[in-house]
Image (spheres, rainbow, N blue to C red):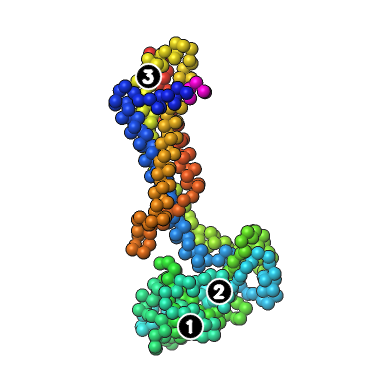
């Protein structure tokens, strides 16, 4: 191994007398360098987009959420509340009510979801930090906070004099109705704030006091849609889940933040995998230049190969020389490419070189997994190409 490595390093650092071979080797090295840099930059860009997309869910979704296994509601009694407070690891919790409603304003109608929240809701989800106008709810008033998407579609602002937003839900029961109004329970509210989180949520939720939502939906005081909880840092999530399951004498579902957004996580991971596979295909084409460079180097060093063989070097040792030459070329090219890619990502983070909007820089993130992934991918493809090229040794020796 030492003999082969020594010769491989000499061949790698020595220019050939044939200029064409030097050009081919340079193109191969450039392909490795550019491929490693490009793959790392793209993966870092997708990591940044993923973190950017998930930042909205981190702002809106709790660490854990208890929801009904069947039906739409669960009942939470005072004894259960006391047990809930005694569970170690829970920092804050809040009771919420969620249901579909129909919004009416100035003869315009829009479907949405009401989210009834209690006074502790902001300790679990700091949605008030996303307010772009107005204030947060007062728990004893008929007030709502709407998303910017709902605001645009209804042409509705906040705290407008006489601007009443009506929330309607179908009445339970059967039988014929004499008018459409009899089919709905409704409540008139005043919009006191507008939030902006992301495009989906901005069109989805109307926040209201929990008491108002219970009145509109006909729920009893202890009847809710779910419990949202935040955990203390370092808490065993599975241990808390087990204690929460024991809290109820009927089946419930308990989901963490990833499970609440499983479609989003699957979409982001699938996109990341697709981009990696596409760039890997490009790298395969680029890195087979390494195999071509090894073949040309073998042809250029034909006399040296025959001399080494005559001096007693086995064909496997000679083959290993060119395999190591290609592997070293791939390794150093990959390291330099990763360094360039890392430098570009750091510059983007520090100086916001590429902007999506005048106020929003393209998000990027440096993850050590991507560094390892790029280097492993480059080395596997480079070593494979080098091995294929090094198999030409048998024909040179036997020829």
The residue lying at 41 percent from left, 47 percent from top is 343
Q: Which mark is residue 121?
A: 2
Q: 10 Å neighbourhood of mark 3: few (<14), some, or many (≥20)?
A: some
Looking at the image, do the residues carrying marks 1 and 2 touch, with CB atoms under 8 Å apart?
no
Q: Most prominent secondary structure in the magenta stretch?
A: helix
Q: CA distance from mark 3 to mark 2?
A: 74 Å
Q: Nearer the viewer, residue 172 or 350?
A: 350
Badge 2 element: helix
The answer to whether residue 2 is visible is yes
Badge 1 element: strand
Q: CA distance from mark 1 to mark 2?
A: 15 Å
The residue lying at 47 percent from left, 57 percent from top is 51
The residue lying at 35 percent from left, 36 percent from top is 30
In this rendering, the count of numbered labels is 3
The answer to whether residue 295 is visible is no
Q: Which residue is under mark 1?
A: 143
Mark 1 vs mark 3, foreground winner is 3
Q: Which mark is residue 35?
A: none
Q: Nearer the viewer, residue 175 or 219?
A: 219
């Amino acid at each position: 191994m030492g003999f082969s490595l020594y010769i491989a390093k000499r061949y790698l650092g020595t220019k050939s007398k044939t200029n064409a071979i030097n050009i081919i080797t340079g193109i191969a090295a450039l392909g490795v360098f550019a491929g490693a840099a490009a793959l790392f930059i793209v993966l870092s860009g997708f990591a940044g987009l993923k973190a950017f997309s998930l930042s909205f869910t981190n702002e809106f979704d709790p660490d854990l959420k208890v929801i009904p296994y069947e039906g739409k509601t669960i009942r939470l009694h005072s004894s259960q509340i006391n047990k809930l407070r005694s569970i170690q690891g829970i920092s804050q919790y809040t009771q919420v009510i969620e249901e579909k409603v129909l919004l009416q304003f100035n003869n315009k109608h829009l479907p949405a979801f009401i989210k009834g929240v209690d006074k502790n809701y902001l300790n679990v989800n700091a949605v008030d930090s996303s307010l772009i106008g107005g204030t947060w709810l007062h728990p004893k008033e008929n007030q709502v906070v709407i998303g910017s998407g709902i605001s645009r579609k209804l042409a509705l602002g906040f705290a407008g004099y006489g601007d009443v937003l009506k929330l309607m839900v179908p009445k339970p029961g059967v039988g014929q109705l004499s008018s459409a109004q009899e089919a709905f329970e409704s409540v008139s509210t005043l919009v006191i704030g507008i939030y902006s989180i992301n495009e989906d949520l901005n069109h989805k939720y109307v926040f209201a006091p929990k008491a108002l939502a219970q009145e509109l939906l006909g729920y009893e005081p202890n009847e809710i849609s779910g419990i949202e909880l935040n955990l203390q840092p370092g808490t065993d999530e599975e241990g808390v889940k087990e204690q929460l399951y024991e809290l109820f004498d009927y089946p419930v579902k308990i989901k963490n933040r990833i499970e609440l957004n499983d479609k989003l996580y699957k979409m982001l991971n699938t996109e990341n995998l697709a981009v990696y596979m596409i760039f890997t295909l490009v790298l395969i084409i680029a890195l087979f230049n390494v195999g071509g460079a090894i073949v040309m180097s073998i042809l250029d060093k034909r006399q040296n190969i025959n001399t080494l063989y005559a001096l007693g070097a086995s064909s496997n040792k000679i083959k290993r020389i060119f395999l190591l030459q290609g592997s070293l070329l791939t390794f150093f090219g990959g390291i330099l490419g990763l360094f360039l890619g890392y430098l570009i990502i750091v510059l983007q983070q520090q100086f916001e070189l590429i902007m999506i909007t005048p106020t929003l820089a393209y998000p990027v993130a440096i993850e050590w997994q991507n560094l390892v992934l790029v280097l492993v991918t480059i080395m596997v493809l480079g070593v494979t190409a080098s091995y294929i090229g090094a198999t030409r040794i048998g024909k040179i020796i036997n020829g």
